[in-house]
């Protein structure tokens, strides 16, 4: 190829971009000053050499291939490429290679020009990152509008951060309700598994409202266990977004990236906005959840009340049936026997027969038994002891009769001084002790039970504590169980409260505190 070298060089040097001419074998014929500055070589070290002699690594071979392709096809080639200059900095270039033809039209070489577009590329990338973050924010806000559950919302946020925001790994740690929990999402299942296996619990003592950004993960000062785990998986930086509810930090979301550029000032501003979007949503959900909880509680207590009144109704029916049976079987029979006996005496007396005196003794026995039966019935309905002797002895009577019916040892501790308690309160206490002792005998598998009653100036303290098998906090509700519920309701109706403390294997304690004014009566 024949060239008017000086002329061409003058033209090439007028171009601010790197420019060169090569022969058809990809050897440099002419290069301009910008080219020499980029590769850091002088003209004699470049001319008649191939690209592999000028550019390090794979770049040289790659340029030779594209040159030869332009010569073979006779078509112009244009591409964007990243190349490392002699200063070691990676830069973007827009390169054009054009075939040079002789008078007959045959390709005799190539002319090339390469423009540094690094700044443009950087701003394009920054723009793309920002666009991803805007998309992430808008998707998060869509999800906020749709989802009514905080756990689900935070998990979806992690997913959006990875799928739309360009983060490789996202996890959220929650500390609400005294319990810590974690949800995470990653660009791949394997990445997530490896992170979850090594990340550990998060200790967060950071400012409640400040997003923490760490661009060099090796120097993280917060969330260190998570930063170490993520660093081992190739992450280079992360942001920690504290999420608040009612001003308290209730969760922290960690967003990890491989690309250190991902935490530009604009991106961090968007992350701050996202953190307050989510905190706002958590506040709103908190209120909704509390409202739902209150409604559920109300529904449950209405249900319990319905069950309780149905129970009381059925207990009343049972009592009536039992009393009717007792009246029929015991009193009916006895009174009939008395009536018959009296008729016999009447007949015998009329005949002047003296046998009626013997008959009289039999009738007295029947009358005594009838009195006993009446007393038994009355005691079942309301223990006579309660009226006659007061609450303490009535409780002792309960304990004794429990001891007689079972192998349970029942210890009773009562106030040393007799206490004046009104009828409503003493019946309530009596019934609570009665139900609690029945439960111990039926369910407790206990060897001992202690009943204790003591009074302070304003309160009556009652406890029934056994050493039996105890129970789960929430007894299974397959069958309607109303003993505990009834005890609670009684305590509530008396203006006090009743608590049941129990754990499997650790016995059960029923304790009631009931307001009481000394000398009260009704
Ligand atoms: N002292 C106790 N020790 C162990 N378990 C108990 C004790 N007291 C109550 N429980 C458990 O709590 C459950 C609820 O007791 P609750 O008195 O409400 O119902 P219940 O005794 O089963 O039936 P009822 O309605 O006839 O009283 C019982 O079924 C039992 O499993
Ligand atoms: Mg019971």
Image (cartoon, helix red, strand yellow):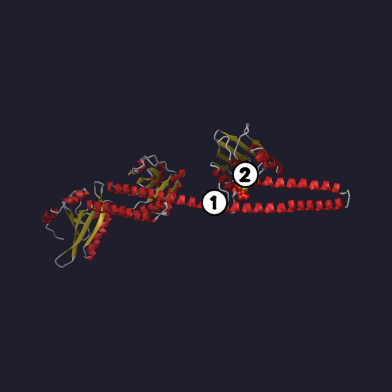
Label located before the other in sequence (1 or 2): 1
| Residue placed most toward the observer, 495 or 224 | 495
Query: In the image, is 24 to the left or to the right of 234?
Result: left
Q: How many marks?
A: 2
- Name the residue that disc number 2 marks: 431
Q: Residue at x 65, y 42 (%)?
A: 446
The N terminus is located in which quarter? bottom left
Which SS class for mark 2?
A: helix
Q: Residue at x 58, y 54 (%)?
A: 310
| Residue placed most toward the observer, 364 or 406 | 364
Position in image of residue 222 (x %, y %): 38, 41
Answer yes or no: is residue 477 visible. no
Relative vertical location of residue 33 with respect to residue 391 in this rendering, above or below? below
Q: Residues within 10 Å of mark 1 (few under 14, many from 20)?
A: some
List the single residue furthest toward the bottom. 104
Position in image of residue 258 (x %, y %): 34, 49
| Residue placed most toward the observer, 191 or 380 | 380
Position in image of residue 186 (x %, y %): 40, 52
Position in image of residue 257 (x %, y %): 35, 49
Structural distance between the alpha carbons of marks 1 and 2:
19 Å
Q: Residue at x 24, y 59 (%)?
A: 79
Relative vertical location of residue 7 with respect to residue 411 in this rendering, above or below? below
Query: In the image, is 55 to the left or to the right of 454?
Result: left
Query: In the image, is 113 to the left or to the right of 343?
Result: left
Answer yes or no: is residue 95 visible. yes
Q: Residue at x 22, y 51 (%)?
A: 119
The C terminus is located in which quarter? top right
- Name the residue that disc number 1 marks: 305
| Residue placed most toward the observer, 171 or 417 | 417
């Amino acid at each position: 190829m024949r060239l008017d070298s000086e002329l061409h060089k003058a033209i090439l040097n007028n171009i601010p971009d790197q420019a060169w001419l090569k022969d058809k074998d990809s050897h440099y014929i002419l290069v301009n000053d910008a080219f020499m500055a980029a590769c850091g070589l002088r003209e004699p070290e470049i001319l008649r050499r191939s690209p592999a002699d000028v550019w390090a690594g794979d770049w040289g071979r790659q340029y030779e291939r594209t040159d030869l392709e332009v010569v073979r096809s006779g078509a112009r080639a244009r591409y964007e490429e990243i190349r490392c200059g002699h200063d070691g900095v990676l830069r973007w270039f827009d390169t054009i290679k054009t075939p040079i033809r002789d008078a007959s039209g045959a390709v005799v070489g190539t002319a090339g020009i390469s423009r540094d577009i690094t700044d443009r590329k950087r701003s394009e990338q920054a723009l793309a990152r920002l666009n991803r973050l805007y998309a992430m924010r808008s998707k998060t806000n869509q999800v906020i509008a749709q989802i009514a559950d905080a756990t689900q919302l935070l998990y979806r946020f992690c997913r959006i951060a990875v799928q739309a925001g360009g983060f490789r790994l996202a996890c959220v740690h929650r500390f609400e309700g005294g319990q810590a929990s974690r949800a995470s999402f990653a660009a791949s299942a394997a990445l997530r598994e490896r992170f979850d296996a090594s990340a550990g619990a998060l200790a967060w003592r950071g400012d409640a409202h400040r997003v923490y950004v760490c661009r060099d993960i090796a120097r993280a000062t917060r969330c260190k266990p998570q930063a170490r785990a993520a660093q081992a998986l190739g992450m280079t930086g992360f942001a920690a977004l504290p999420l608040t509810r009612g001003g308290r930090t209730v969760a922290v979301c960690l967003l990890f990236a491989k690309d250190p550029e991902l935490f530009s000032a604009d991106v961090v501003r968007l992350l701050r906005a996202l953190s307050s979007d989510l905190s706002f949503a958590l506040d709103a959900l908190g209120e909704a959840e509390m409202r739902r909880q209150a409604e559920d509680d109300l529904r449950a207590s209405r249900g319990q009340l319905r069950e309780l009144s149905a129970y009381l109704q059925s207990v009343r029916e049972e009592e009536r049936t039992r009393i009717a049976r007792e009246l029929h079987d015991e009193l009916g029979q006895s009174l009939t026997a008395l009536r018959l006996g009296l008729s016999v005496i009447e007949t015998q007396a009329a005949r002047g027969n003296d046998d009626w005196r013997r008959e009289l003794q039999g009738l007295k026995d029947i009358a005594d038994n009838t009195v006993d039966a009446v007393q038994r019935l009355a005691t079942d309905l309301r223990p006579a002891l309660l009226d006659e002797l007061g609450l303490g002895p009535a409780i002792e009577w309960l304990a004794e009769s429990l001891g007689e019916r079972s192998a349970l040892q029942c210890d009773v501790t009562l106030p040393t001084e007799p206490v004046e308690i009104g009828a409503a309160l003493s019946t309530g206490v009596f019934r609570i002790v009665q139900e609690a002792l029945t439960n111990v005998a039926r369910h407790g598998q206990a060897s001992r039970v202690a009943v204790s009653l003591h009074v302070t100036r304003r309160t009556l303290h009652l406890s029934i504590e056994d050493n039996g098998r105890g129970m789960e906090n929430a007894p299974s509700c397959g069958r309607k169980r109303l003993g505990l519920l009834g005890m609670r309701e009684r305590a509530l109706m008396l203006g006090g409260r009743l608590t049941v403390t129990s754990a499997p294997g650790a016995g059960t304690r029923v304790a009631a505190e009931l307001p009481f004014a000394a000398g009260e009566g009704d």
